Image (tube, grey):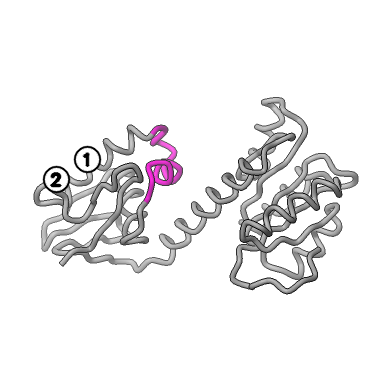
Amino acid sequence: MNTKPVPTDLSHILLVDDDSRLRNLLDKYLTKNGFRVTCAADSVQARKFLGIFEFDMILLDVMMPGETGLELTKYLRAFKTVPILLLTAMNETEDRILGLETGADDYLSKPFEPRELLLRIENILRRVKLEDQITRNEEVFQFGPYRFDLRSNLLYRGPIMTKLTESETVILRAFVASPGTVLSRDDLSKLDSSNVNTRTIDVQITRLRKKIEDDPKFPRYLQTIRGQGYVFKLGL
């Protein structure tokens, strides 16, 4: 465990692995890249730290002496929603499926490039932040002449009601939770399991624009940021 003072606003990661060399390497790498890291050598230490600190994410080795990573994941999922990324030397499809069925959010096989691990961590934390923002949002969101009722998923323009599809609702909820923030196609596809590729997202955006824009070809609210994704602008 790190003993030097670290800023408390950094994302806090619990790293659990019985390989001390890998633990130390990842501790240094993640700390260098802007994370607060607490290290544990096994599930016993991990449980101790989980009782003391709040973590934003857990990196968990599967094959450890004593309680395995899968067993700890199953235990944690009974009362915690913290994202879990499993690290393992096993590379069989069935093993990965078992890890995900147990409740893990992602699975990375050893050996791996630290950069890939960093990208997976950032993607998961970005998704969790976006979902939290959506949850915290007010029940009714207003933009221009529109009112979006987050309880019923209905869109109103004055007294006229427009019903949104499930995919359109997911996308609009994401945008109203983060107005002014660029959301990539990948960000949006991860929020809706029915949108399996980025092309599907483009189609949904086009359909949504027809429902909220006076001129969908020149959108006022749902604008394209070339090479990055889309941004929701409130306008005047």
* Point 72% across, 58% down: residue: 14
Left of 167 or right of it: where is 57?
right
The quadrant where residue 114 appears: top right
Q: Give the secondary structure at mark 2.
A: loop
212 relative position to 115: left or right: left
Of the two numbered discs 1 and 2 on the same chain, state the one appearing first in sequence: 1
Q: Which residue is mark 2?
A: 216
Q: Quadrant of the N terminus?
A: bottom right
Residue 192 at x, y percent in the picture = 41, 42
- Name of the residue lying farthest toward the right: 65
Question: Which image quarter: residue 56?
Answer: bottom right
Q: Residues within 10 Å of mark 2 (few under 14, many from 20)?
A: some
Question: Percent position (x, y) of residue 8?
Answer: 64, 73
Note whether 141 is above or below 76 in the view shown. below
The image shows a total of numbered marks equal to: 2
Q: Would residue 6 appear left or right of 65 to someone viewing this image?
A: left
Question: Percent from the top left, x then y, of residue 133?
Answer: 43, 62
Report the magenta residues as a range: 183-197
Q: Residue at x 36, y 54 (%)?
A: 174
Q: Disc 1 vs disc 2: Cβ atoms closer than 8 Å?
A: yes
Tell me the element at label 1.
Answer: helix
Residue at position x 48%, y 61% in the image: 132
Q: Amino acid at mark 1?
A: Thr
Q: Position of residue 167 (x, y in %)?
A: 33, 43
Q: Amino acid at mark 2?
A: Pro
Q: Residue at x 82, y 44 (%)?
A: 68
Q: Is residue 194 magenta-colored?
A: yes
Q: Which residue corresponds to mark 1? A: 206
Q: CA distance from mark 1 to mark 2?
A: 8 Å
